[in-house]
Amino acid sequence: MIIRSKKASDISSSEITPPEIYLGRRRFIRDAGLGLATLALSGTTSTNEVAGQSQEIPPRFRNLKSELGEDLNSYRDITTYNNFYEFGTDKRDPSRNSSEFEPQPWTVSIEGHVNKPGNYELDDILAPVTMEDRIYRLRCVEAWSMVIPWHGFPLADLIKRVEPTSNAKFVRFETVHRPEQMPYQKTGVLPWPYVEGLRIDEAMHPLTTLVTGVYGTELPNQNGAPLRLIVPWKYGFKGIKSIVKIEFVEEMPTNTWKMANSFEYGFYSNVNPEVSHPRWSQARERRLPSLFKSHETLMFNGYGEEVSQLYAGMDLHRWK
């Protein structure tokens, strides 16, 4: 899975972001009359701008396209076709099986080589952040792709606040472990809890984003509520969901898919269409709702100019 961002010069956030988003997370939920329970139970929001629209795209987003001129996917596409193995292995399972998940209240543990470790309430994490919407292009070269308008904030903003020490070489992320609410955590389909990792310089890159919502609404359960990671130039399994722990470590962490199948999945997971997955080509991808792989996959998802320097001198065939 890979992600591509619309350039800031293409459209200003004020054109797509309702003012209430800037007024704070709690106030936005209250003023919009929208609770996380509504998202979790129905898979759609109760606002007029999302539910009940024939195209299921809020009016303020309907004229937007990706930087390559592509249409946005519908809210239904985005919230009913997901990879979230904690709720099931079929793409439809997360929307079917996540209604019992409770994303409020939420605490994130910051641990390891930082000067300000601790348990941070989600509102404390979000309070000093200017919530600027960004348009992202979400794609998965394994089988499918989407164009999704996420909103969130740079992970670097949080990292700077907790002040990592010089010993922090990598950042390790962990998903919440709640087998009573996440039924597939009772199975052995993957080693639980789900773990992902980045180098500290990757984590600090301005494109690396902590996501809190989609289409101007709170992030639905099936999409990783209430806090998930987006790394635009990497495959989507790097986008760990429902994060409860962020740990700053010296050694490269073993991420879940490498742990489960190191032959097929490496630590870096950078988009490289020249390297085939052992079971399929990654040169082209299928854009939902199409049935055909009609889109060319771009190196680093088209972010080479922004991120290629992070991997100067590395063999991107070997360090997959």
Image (cartoon, rainbow, N blue to C red):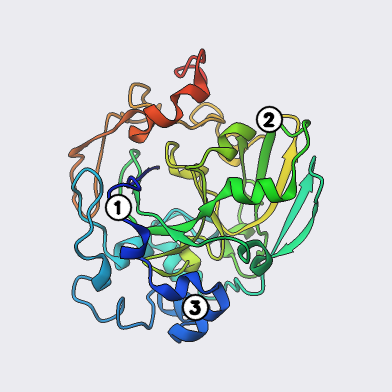
Please report contact status of discs 2 and 3: CB closer than 8 Å, yes or no: no
Distance between the alpha carbons at the discs numbered 1 and 2: 31 Å
Please give left or right for residue 264 compared with residue 80 in the image.
right
Please give left or right for residue 141 compared with residue 184 in the image.
left
Distance between the alpha carbons at the discs numbered 2 and 3: 38 Å
Query: x, y percentage for residue 274?
Result: 33, 21
- Check residue 147 in the rendering and tell me which mark sits there, or answer none: 1
Q: Which amino acid does label 2 sit on?
A: Met
Q: Mark 3 points at which residue?
A: 28
Relative vertical location of residue 197 with respect to residue 146 in this rendering, above or below: above
Q: Name the residue under label 2.
A: 252
**Quadrant occupied by the N terminus:** top left
Residue ID at (24%, 52%): 288
Query: x, y percentage for residue 78?
Result: 35, 61
Dot 2 or dot 3, earlier in sequence: 3
Q: Which amino acid does label 3 sit on?
A: Phe
Q: In which quarter of the image is residue 72?
A: bottom left
Please give left or right for residue 180 compared with residue 118 in the image.
left
Residue ID at (46%, 71%): 21
Q: Which amino acid does label 1 sit on?
A: Val
